[in-house]
Image (cartoon, helix red, strand yellow):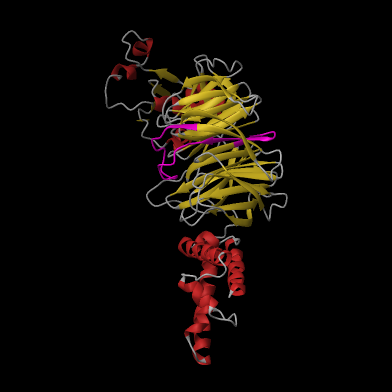
């Protein structure tokens, strides 16, 4: 019986590793449940299997396919074989035509929604576009609200070339006398920003921002700016995918899966040709893989449900091998590796389900792990931080921890890993989610519902100055920094935006230099030049989207 179990385990693991395993999510979850039962049975010395389909498969010692067992006669067997053969061929043809996951999938409309991909534009092209709009006689009226700043941010620094006027409630404002339209600034029906054209037509902020450049081009006959970011591929990944890391020509993706009680997965993709990502391997994980980071030939995964750090040897990417695991503080949420240490931000509460969003609890922790020997990771230090820490970054002797529920940005001295200490604590505001380091600036998402990013000058970590404000079109949920740029993904506006990390205007506003629509609601971004890898989701589906940055 044990040999039969092992054989069935091998069959299911082969299916799990296939590229189309998650196309039928219900069937996939049944197979994962069956696999877990078989492994428990083998580990327990061959105890009973409760899954009926597994019992059926084990009862046949001649390895006859299960669907042939429905008949005792040769005639019926042949008929059943023909019938299921036709069904199988039809299904495979359908999968090939509509769901082939190793070739790029182009965006397609979702019922009731508009899918409009607006690519990033070079700054010189945007400057020419803004100048043409001005020469055409168009006028842009804004009042400094979030929508106005977000729409200007689509032009980057070229927003200075726009034919805009600021309409305020100040009765002495020169805009009142210069622009007749501003005479009606107190009218509550006006939804700023507003574009007005020489023919008397106009549109306000109800216009889809992702389609703004196309509409402006149609109204003014100005040439539509050409993109510098292009969507090159989109591939299905298991539901509830939480994190992605890229190293060399491989992308590593961790997911919760359909049923979080059954376990998650680590998938490895060959992205040597980013337009055709190829699934190489799927490894089953425990119940709550929350974040992954890669350093050298090792991948480090934190599990928020089982309070674990798992270490994988990925020297052979097509066959990652789990080489170690250790218990962490309660509910690890984020991990970063620098040198021989891993820094883990842990939520710290055990009295709530791991997957409830931002529950109320006491302060979290930063835990420091010595990974100089990846086979034997060792916890060497920890320190209490704010409530529900969601992200951590490390630069030289300092760690930066952001806490969602308490709104704290804490800077910690980790030069002595066994004795980390608090350097400063700055209240950012509630609903803070992610941070990114770029040069002397630390970028932080704040007040995510309003779409804001703060840039802190951390050249003096002891007392960070007031941050410089950047505005994104909607809700920034994750940041990533690379090569002097900061990359933001916003939901539910479905926008991937790029900021030049050093460009501020005279009012300390940081403007985005480029943006592109994503297919699903983005949740994570990882940049490995010249490509950006974004995890997005829509209801129960998840994707890995790949964009080329020119």
Q: Nearer the viewer, residue 325 or 300?
A: 325
- State whether residue 406 is above or below residue 369: above
Q: Which residues are magenta?
A: 336-364
Q: Nearer the viewer, residue 160 or 433?
A: 433
Residue depicted at x 60% and y 15%: 460
Q: Is residue 487 visible?
A: no
- State whether residue 141 is above or below residue 107: above
Q: Quadrant of residue 8?
A: bottom right
Magenta span dominant secondary structure: loop
Residue depicted at x 69% and y 33%: 339
Q: Nearer the viewer, residue 510 or 171?
A: 510
Is residue 276 located in the magenta-colored stretch of the structure?
no
Image quadrant where one finds the N terminus: bottom right
**Residue 45 spot, x, y in % from top left:** 57, 68
Q: Is residue 382 left or right of residue 178?
A: right
Q: Nearer the viewer, residue 310 or 433?
A: 310
Q: Quadrant of residue 119?
A: top right
């Amino acid at each position: 019986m044990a040999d039969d179990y092992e054989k069935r385990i091998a069959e299911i693991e082969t299916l799990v590793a296939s590229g189309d395993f998650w196309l039928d999510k219900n069937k996939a979850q049944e197979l994962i449940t069956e696999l877990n039962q078989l492994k428990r049975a083998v580990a327990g010395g061959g105890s009973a299997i409760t899954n009926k389909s597994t019992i059926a498969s084990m009862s046949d010692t001649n390895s006859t396919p299960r669907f042939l067992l429905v008949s005792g006669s040769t005639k019926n067997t042949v008929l059943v074989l023909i019938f299921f053969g036709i069904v199988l061929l039809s299904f495979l043809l359908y999968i090939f035509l509509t769901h082939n996951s190793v070739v790029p999938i182009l965006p397609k409309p979702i019922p009731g929604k508009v899918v409009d991909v607006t690519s990033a534009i070079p700054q010189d092209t945007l400057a020419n576009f803004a100048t043409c709009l001005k020469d055409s006689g168009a006028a842009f009226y804004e009042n400094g609200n979030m929508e106005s700043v977000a729409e200007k941010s689509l032009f980057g620094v070229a927003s200075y070339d726009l034919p805009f006027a600021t309409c305020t409630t100040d009765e002495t404002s020169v805009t009142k006398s210069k622009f007749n339209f501003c005479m009606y600034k107190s009218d509550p029906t006006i939804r700023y920003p507003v574009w007005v054209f020489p023919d008397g037509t106009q549109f306000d902020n109800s216009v889809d921002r992702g389609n703004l450049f196309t509409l402006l081009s149609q109204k003014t006959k100005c040439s539509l700016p050409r993109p510098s970011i292009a969507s090159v591929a989109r591939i299905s990944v298991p539901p509830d995918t939480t994190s992605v890391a890229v190293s060399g020509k491989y992308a590593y993706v961790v997911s919760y899966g359909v049923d979080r009680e059954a376990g998650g997965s680590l998938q490895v993709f060959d992205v040597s040709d980013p337009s055709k990502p190829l699934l190489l391997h799927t490894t089953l994980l425990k119940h709550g893989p929350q974040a992954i980071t890669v350093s050298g030939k090792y991948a480090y995964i934190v599990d928020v449900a089982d309070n674990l750090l798992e270490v994988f040897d990925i020297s052979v990417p097509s066959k990652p091998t789990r080489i170690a695991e250790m218990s962490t503080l309660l509910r690890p949420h984020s991990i970063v590796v620098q040198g021989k240490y891993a820094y883990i931000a842990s939520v710290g509460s055990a009295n709530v389900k791991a997957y409830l969003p931002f529950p109320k609890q006491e302060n979290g922790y930063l835990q420091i792990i010595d990974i100089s020997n990846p086979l034997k990771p060792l916890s060497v230090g920890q320190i209490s931080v704010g409530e529900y820490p969601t992200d951590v970054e490390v630069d030289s002797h300092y760690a930066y921890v952001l806490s969602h529920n308490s709104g704290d940005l804490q800077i910690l001295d980790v030069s002595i890993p066994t004795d980390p200490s608090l350097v400063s604590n700055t209240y950012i505001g509630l609903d803070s989610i992610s941070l990114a380091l770029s040069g002397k600036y630390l970028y932080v998402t704040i007040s995510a519902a309003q779409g804001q990013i703060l840039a802190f000058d951390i050249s003096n970590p002891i007392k960070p100055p007031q941050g410089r404000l950047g505005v994104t079109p909607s809700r920034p949920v994750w940041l990533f920094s690379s090569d002097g740029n900061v990359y933001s993904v916003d939901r539910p506006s479905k926008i991937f935006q790029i900021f030049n990390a050093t460009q501020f205007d005279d009012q300390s506003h940081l403007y985005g230099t480029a943006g592109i629509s994503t297919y699903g609601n983005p949740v994570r971004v990882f940049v490995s030049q010249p490509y950006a890898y974004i995890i997005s989701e829509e209801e129960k589906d998840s994707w890995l989207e790949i964009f080329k940055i020119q």
